[in-house]
Amino acid sequence: MANGILHAVKKVRGGVMVSHNKNTKDMPVERIAAPKQVVLPMVQHIGAPCQPIVSVGDTVEVGQKIGDTDAFVSAPIHSSVSGTVTAIKEIKTATGMPVTAVFIDNDGEMRLHESVKPPVINSREEFLKAIRESGLVGLGGAGFPTHVKLAFKPDAGIDTLVINAAECEPYITVDYRECIDNSRNILAGVYELQKYLGFEQVVIAVEDNKPDAIKILNEIAHDERDIGDKVKVMTLKSKYPQGAEKMMVQSATGRKVPPGKLPADVGCVVMNVGSVGFIGRYLRTGRPLVSRSLTVDGSAIANPKNVRVPVGTSLQDIIDFCGGFKEEPAKIITGGPMMGVSVIGTEYPVLKQNNAILAFTKKENVYKKERDCIRCGRCANVCPMSLMPTLIDRFAMARDVESLKGTGVMVCMECGSCAYSCPAGKPLVQSMREAKHLLREEANKK
Amino acid sequence: MSEEKRLLNVSASPHFRSNDTVTGIMLDVIIAMIPSLLASTYIFGLRVLLVTAVSVVSCVGFEFISRKVMKRHNTLADLSAVVTGMLLAFNLPVDIPLAMVVIGAAVAIIVAKQFFGGIGQNFVNPALVGRIVLMVSFPVYMSNYGMPFAWQHKGVDIVTTATPLSVLGNVADKADLTGADLPSLMYMFMGIRQGSIGEVCAIALILGFLYLLIRKVIKPTIPLCFVGTVALIMLIAGKGNFTFVGYEVLSGGLLLGAIFMATDYTTSPVNFKGQVIFAIGCGLITSVIRLFGSLPEGVSFSIIIMNILVPQIEKFTTPKPFGTVKEKKAKEETK
């Protein structure tokens, strides 16, 4: 029965139809054996870096906090294995940023730290403090500290929680698996959030290519705990980038987030379904964010799987668990093919916010020959933010900062729809980044 | 085995790209023009192919030479010069001297296209510039439209009569077409009438239109608004005479222009609103020239004029970035 299923309030502009390639959707998450060593960078979120609070030679246990900071916009880091700290040194992350990392040798015992116990929560403040201590960041890919997002004042006029289960990136199925396998956790998470933060409505948004997930989420929405029918499931047309925050808010409420503003400015909080599920589990077990689910897929992977891995496991260890490469990989991506980051090697550790490892062979790793723009307008027509990417590209290449100011490029979320559809093969996302950089530089001059 | 590290490709996202390419799009346009080319060859004879071949070869040649002279990268592979060549030929009468075809191609490619930076940079449609320059320079040759099937009657002296459009232009009361020397509407639809190479066969042009729609190369906005505007104005001018509207829509280069030339990416607006304004403008100017001008046909001029106005149209129709609050509304809210 389809009762209680909302359809999108507002159809979202633009976007592209990418092939879904959800090959791993029927594969329950497999737990990977903890690796011999984990590497835990002190930045696994957007915000201030953490400082290591352990020293070389210290013995640590699973769930023990090893990095923290006084800064508000940040999230603590916990050890994902039990063992010995062997090194604290600077490494480079996949994006090339230098960052301090703690190296821990696993003793194989996976002893839990004494701090791992269900948090006692009686108030909104205690709830937010617990979320912070859990180390939770947005698990959908961006990695924004969740407690910061939730720390709005009760009178801030925030009335809607949008739970993002759209998973619009191709290949990735971990959010889908979370809905199927861990619906109890999501359910618990939804009602705890509702209880402590007092949302007037909770909208769980999911793309219409996941009927099983819709069914299960609908059961959650009709739980007896839902007093006043506040929780609803909303189906969205499967179209990239439905899962983008601003798109979600528009679909769910019809409200548009103005340029330079956040969903909170129009009374909404958007959370990934995985993050909500984590909250449910954390409040029950007290186990901080030390492991996460990943989709491992792509044409170069021997046995594509969904896996649950300790944070800090190297990409290579995970790929080996999935049977290694069946063909020489040409490109490896952490995250989805539309917005993920390509890496130069497999030695990088998995971070809290990574949701997939995709390895592609030469055949898939196609580059179009770059040609001149023919003004076909595909980029402008698919841009969910109503920008004119080709124009921005032209200004950015000419370093014409004055003209860039009128283009609104700062609202670009780099979803990649423009570059995806460009017949001239222009690296438009790169141009958007360049344009934003030029504008920021200009702003800093003043 | 050496311990040499595998080097992986890195690039900015997205890591997937659609299958659309510039060359593919141009190829689709070429394919869409083939029905009309074949129909015209049947109607006007093999010289159609000769004129088209000369036009295409000269366009490609001029493109190659001008890129070389200007020390810019070769752009032949994008096939845009082929499209321009075919479109230019489509706009010429079948009996045009070949030297003029070459002149037209030179104007189209060198002046209208490459002087402004080549593909994607020209502000007017190159093929139309070629046609207009030829029309102004060699009016006699350019209006010497061949008779349908004249090639089958070699040696027989066929009297060239006025084209349907000039006949229509001379009819005083547009509501009453009795006595006017016009081919039947069916003939008009099938292309058995005088006219330039690519414009005569309506069925073939519509086939091409459908192909372009199916391949998502163009959207129906511009052709429909263009033809629709002309039809509407002619309906008023003809005081509700649908036969007159039918003749107006099917004669001249309206369908060719609306489907293949007004839809040129480079010289038409990018977004929907702009396209509607652009196409209505084309339709208005075409109708005004046809009804009141001394020239029988106005499609090429109308498209060129609207091409020039595209930057102005875009200035007013480009949507504001997502979430931008309209100034008026913002003021109201602050009140």
Image (cartoon, rainbow, N blue to C red):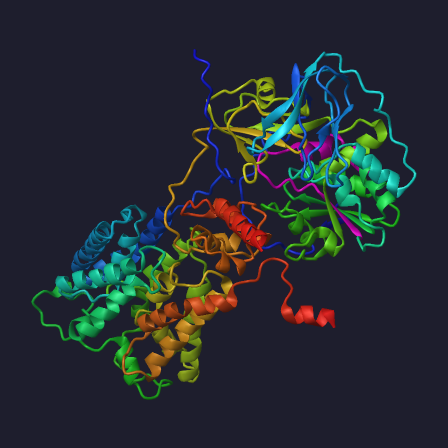
Task: Identify the residue at image location x=46%, y=60%.
Answer: B270
Residue B91 in sight from this viewpoint = yes
Quarter of the image that includes the C terminus of chain A: bottom right
Residue A388 picture location, percent across and down? 50, 56
Residue farthest along the front direction in this orientation: A446
Q: Is residue B76 left or right of residue B98?
A: right
Furthest residue to the right?
Answer: A122
Q: Position of residue A38 (x, y in %)?
A: 66, 20
Counting from the top left corner in percent of width and height, residue A180 is at 72, 32
Tell me: residue B233, above or below residue A148. below
Q: Is residue B304 above or below residue A100?
A: below
Would residue A225 appear left or right of A439 to someone viewing this image?
right
Q: Nearer the viewer, residue B191 or A65?
A: A65
- Residue B335 in the magenta stretch? The answer is no
Q: Is residue A298 visible?
A: no
**Picture residue at 71% right of the left edge, 30% below the top:** A51
Count of numbered labels shown in the rendering: 0
Q: Nearer the viewer, residue A28 or A247?
A: A247
Whether the magenta-drawn stretch holds residue A177 is answered as yes
Compared with B18, B137 (above or below) is: below
Q: x%, y% of residue A168?
A: 61, 41
The one nearer the camera, B163 or A210, is: A210
- Classify A28 as above or below A155: above
Q: Quadrant of the N terminus of chain A?
A: top right
Q: Is residue A326 left or right of residue B99?
A: right
Q: Quadrant of residue A99?
A: top right
Q: Which range is magenta?
A: A159-188
Within the image, what quadrant is residue B302 found in?
A: bottom left
Left or right of B315 in this view: A118: right
